[in-house]
Image: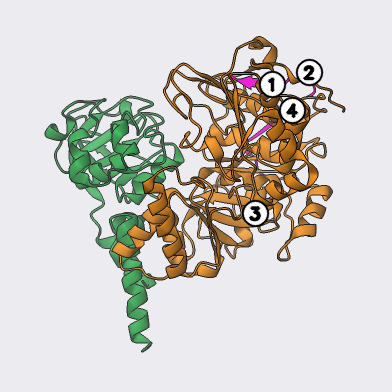
Chain colours: A orange, B green
Amino acid sequence: MPMTAVEKVLASCSGRSELRAGDVVEPQPDFVMIHDGVVLSAKRELDQLGIDRLAQPERVMIVTDHEVIYPNARSAERGAANRRAAKQWGVGRFYDVGQGGHGHIFPMESGLLLPGMFYFDNDRHSTNAGAIGAFGFRMGSEISRVLATGTNWVMVPKTIRLALTGRARPGVFGRDIGFVIAKHFREGGSWGVNPDYRVLEFAGDLDQFDLAQRTALCSSPTEVRAYGTFFPPSAAIVERAKAVAQRPFTPVYPDDNASYEARLSLDISSIEPQVALPGGVHRAVDVSEVAGTPVDHAFIGSCGSGHYEDLQLAARALAGKRIAPGVRLMIAPGSETSSRRMLDDGLMKVFVEAGAVMLPAGCGVCNDGVIGPVDGGEVSISTFAGNNNGRIGPKDAQLFLGNPATVAASAVAGCIVDPRTVMDFVQ
Amino acid sequence: MNAIGKTELVKRHDWRLRGRAWVLGHDIQHQGGVVPAWIVTGRHMDPAEIIPHLFEETDPGFHTRCRPGDIVVAGRSFGMGPKMNGYIAMKALGLGLVCESMPFLGYRGAIGAGLRVLTDCQGATEECETGDELEVDFDSGMFINHTRGTRREYPPLADSLKEIVALGGNIGWLQQWWAGQQGARGGSGS
């Protein structure tokens, strides 16, 4: 029976020869990820039940990305509790403060998450795994069952196939296309298919997208409730993964005649750089429609735009320039490896000389503005994963989203600008 | 937990509810519809704390009027959101839930709370009105409206999920699993 990518991957780690959407399985994950914000609640839950050991602690990865800089006493207390939990459980990989980076970025960069893998995560942005051709499934608070028993039940999601056709224009990036995809999906959108608990499998002219662009494309579908995303890994992605792989892996590709809930296609050749208006990633408009809007606050990073290539793009917009008076710009790399690389190749100098504030690798401001929030009435433009009203401060603050070049160029201009008007992009 | 234990457990569970219908509309979100937002953001999981606020913004005073065995019949896209606070309260009140559709993570939350729930029950809100005497078998999917004298067959709860509901939800499931592990350890002399 022909299978989609998610059916194949789940079949392979559930000991089944075939699976179809709607089947319930208990897959054996390659690893289990839990972030610094929820270790304590999982530990408490298991402690209360007397469960004092994990099924496969060597496969558990604790990442510290949500509150890397402890912004308050409660956060420091949680950090201490996380260290105790990691020790008591004997987890295989504990990335403490200043190690690793963003849990949905650094494992792809460092060869921990590889094509064809499956893992469980407490967090919904595990959909990023699709960028490299893998799956990470969100378990929320049910991650405790995964920790204790090694797995949990999963209903195989339906798959929607989306073919991206044509070439993106110079200056148009994964985030721009992602906002347009979200707009089409959103209820009342033109595609008439609900992405809730679906896997969005990309197809079409995909060789133009590197890992950073693929990751960016995985971001916005997540915000309109896709449960997974998947890119068939290109030769370049597989080569990159091989170069850093910490274990052998086998890429997975969907079968030709797999059964999809819907087959959609999007011509990306006419898409302009986009801005998502405050209220949701699906509120996409051409950047020209809001150009000139003054901004107070800007941020580059997050699971949607935290790869090294995203930082390079921002640096091109900032090189030799200063951010406008009255604007504050914060940058959070996706990994500690990127932070070190930025020192070596001069990006750090560009950012600091431009007047940006460098944050440690991790979620940065995107984690609910626990650090770097906005005041009421302020205007922000960022590469956050989402821009629901009130995300990083009072609900009347306006949160715009754009690609890393748009955000950086807008911070320099002091207002939202089309990055193509201030820098050159080559095809 | 061995296979026989599981089957027995599921068989012994009380899958049939008989009570009054409480019919709700479409698109009632979990946060702000089933329970107020502060219950979710404050991570309140104690049923005693949640019950006075169940359906507070949809049907004020609901908790004072409902009785064990009653069945909430909801329309399309009920309970949007991945949290389970509201279902914990519904379970504690002895209610059942039948809805026309439920976003999957909401359904997962209801199962995790141990709530007797049926989803994908097409036209269910047309099959009854508030106050009708209903009988619903969550094991088979049988839906009887005794007031109207009508009967429908809806998709039952998936077999693989019945065990979680029978054990009272995720916490009960984990308790039972751990007891089984301890038993196995004791039995093997380790």
**Which residue carries the number 4 mark?**
A318
Q: Which mark is residue A422?
A: 2
Give the image location of residue A273, x and y in percent: 72, 21
Tell me the amino acid under the disc marked 3.
Answer: Pro
Q: Secondary structure at mark 3?
A: helix
Q: Are marks 1 and 3 on the same chain?
A: yes
Q: Indicate which disc, 1 or 4, sits on the residue closer to the N terminus.
A: 4
CA distance for labels 1 and 4: 7 Å
Q: Indicate which disc, 1 or 2, sits on the residue closer to the N terminus.
A: 1
* Mark in the foreground, 4 or 2: 4
Q: Is there any visible trace of residue A226 in the rendered image?
A: no
* Mark in the foreground, 1 or 2: 1
**Which residue carries the number 1 mark?**
A412
Rendered residue at 78%/15% (across/down): A421
Dot 2 crowding, Cα within 10 Å, few <14, some 14–19, many 20+: some
Q: Indicate which disc, 4 or 2, sits on the residue closer to the N terminus.
A: 4
Tell me the amino acid under the disc marked 1.
Answer: Val
Q: Secondary structure at mark 1?
A: helix
**Which residue carries the number 3 mark?**
A107
